[in-house]
Image: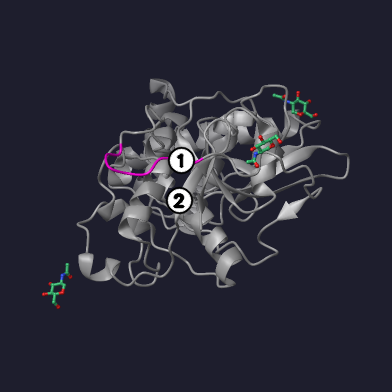
Amino acid sequence: MASISLTNFMTCLAFLSTLALCGSQAFCRSHDGQSMMVRRHEEWMAKHGRTYKDMDEKARRCIIFKQNVEWIDNFNTAGLDRRYTVSVNEFADLSNEEFRAMRNGYKRQTSKTTYTGSSIATSFRYANLSDVPASVDWRQKGAVTPIKDQQKWCCWAFSAVASMEGINQLKTGKLISLSEQELVDCDTKGEDQGCGGGLMDNAFQFIIQNHGLTTEDNYPYKGADGTCNSNKTTAIAATITGYEDVPANDEKALLQAVANHPVSVAIDADGTAFQFYSSGIFNGTCGTDLDHGVTVVGYGADADGTKYWLVKNSWGTGWGEDGYIKMQRDIDAKEGLCGIAMEASYPTV
Ligand SMILES: *[C@@H]1O[C@H](CO)[C@@H](O)[C@H](O)[C@H]1NC(C)=O
Ligand SMILES: *[C@@H]1O[C@H](CO)[C@@H](O)[C@H](O)[C@H]1NC(C)=O
Ligand SMILES: *[C@@H]1O[C@H](CO)[C@@H](O)[C@H](O)[C@H]1NC(C)=O
C-alpha cells in the first residue's frame, strides 16, 4: 500500500498547486472527493502539528494519507466480526515501510553472552506456580507509569524500564519513572546501540553493572542518541539484582510471570493493522520477526471469553487504547500472537 502511483501523485500535486494558486481555501472546498481528502489531510496535519518542507512533499504525504485512510475505512467496514478496530492516528502519513523503519528497533537475540563480563539470566522462578488469578492489571496496583513516547526506535529501553519500574514499585511501594535516556546514552556495549536498536536483556545487564538507573526527571528522554552524562548517572533511584528469561514459546509460563509483575516482551509489530490499531482485542495476522519491545502489564478475558494480554506500548497515548493494546492470548501457535512468548524477560530485585 505504500507504492505511489505516478497518476495519483500528479493528481494530488496538480490539486495542491490549484489550491496554492487560487489562494482561498473556501474557493476550493466545493471540489470532488480528492479535495475532501486534501482537506482531511490538512485537518489531520493541524491536529498533529505536522508540516512538510515543500508542496511536493505535501503531495506525496497526501497520497500516502489517502491510501491509509481508505485502508482504515475499508478495514473497519469489512471486519464486523473482528474484535478490534483501527483508526487514523498520528502515523497516517507514513507508509508501512517507513513506519517499520522508524518505530521499531528490537535486535533479535543472537547469543546470551555477547555482553562481556556480565551475569546471565538465572532460572525461571515461577515454574511451579499453579495458582494464578483469572485477570491481572498492574496499572490498578500502581505499578505502571504513564504511557511514554519513544518517538524514534529506542523501544528496547522503554520495554526494559517499564518492567523495572513495575518491579521496583512492587518491592518498595514507590512508583518512580526511570530514565530511558540513560540506557540510550550509556548502555553502548554489545548489541545495544542507542536508538539504533537493542535488547532488553542487555539493558538489564547494563543496569546491574551500573548499580541502577536514575529518574526520568533527572535524565529526561531526548529521542536521540547522546553522550553519557556521568554526572547524572550517580543519582541512582532504583536498582535490580538480576534478571530472568521466561521459558520460550510458552504462554503458560508468561502467564505465571505476569501474575507476579510486569514483563518485558519482544513482538513483531510490523503490520499495517498494528500501525493503526485503535481498540479491542488485536488478533491481526502477524509474523514472528521480533522487531519491537513492549511490556506486558496484565491479562484477562473479555465478556465472551476471548483471552488477551494487556500490553503497554511506548508510542504515546494517541495510539491504541490510550497507548495500550490488548493482544489475543493463548492462540494455537506456541510462539504466541506476534511472537509475544518468544523472548520475554524481567528484572529481579
Ligand atoms: C480474529 O478473530 C476474529 C473474530 O473471532 C476471527 O473472525 C478472525 O479469523 C481472527 N483472525 C485471525 C488471524 O485469527
Ligand atoms: C519445581 O518443582 C520441581 C519438582 O518438584 C523441582 O525439581 C524444581 O526445583 C521446582 N522449580 C522451582 C523453580 O521451584
Ligand atoms: C559534570 O559536572 C562537572 C562539574 O560540575 C562539569 O564541569 C561538567 O561539565 C559536567 N558534565 C556534563 C556532561 O554535564
Q: Are marks 1 and 2 in contact (CB under 8 Å)?
A: yes
Q: Nearer the viewer, residue 169 or 116?
A: 116
Residue range highlighted in magenta? 115-122
Tag 2: residue type? Answer: Gly
**Where is residue 298 drawn, in percent x and y?**
68, 50
Of the image marks 1 and 2, the number of the one nearer the N terminus: 1
Residue 185 higher or lower than 96, as above or below:
below
Q: Does residue 119 belong to the magenta stretch?
A: yes
**Where ligand 1 lies, by image quadrant?**
top right
Q: Nearer the viewer, residue 295 or 286?
A: 295
Query: What residue sits 44% from the left and 66% below the top?
Result: 238
Q: Nearer the viewer, residue 140 or 314?
A: 140
The answer to whether any part of residue 282 appears in the image is yes
Kindly indicate the quadrant of the structure image that contains residue 288.
top right
Tag 1: residue type? Answer: Ala
Badge 2 crowding class, 10 Å Cα cut-off, few under 14, some 14 to 19, many 20 or more, is some
Residue hosting label 2: 242
Residue hosting label 1: 121
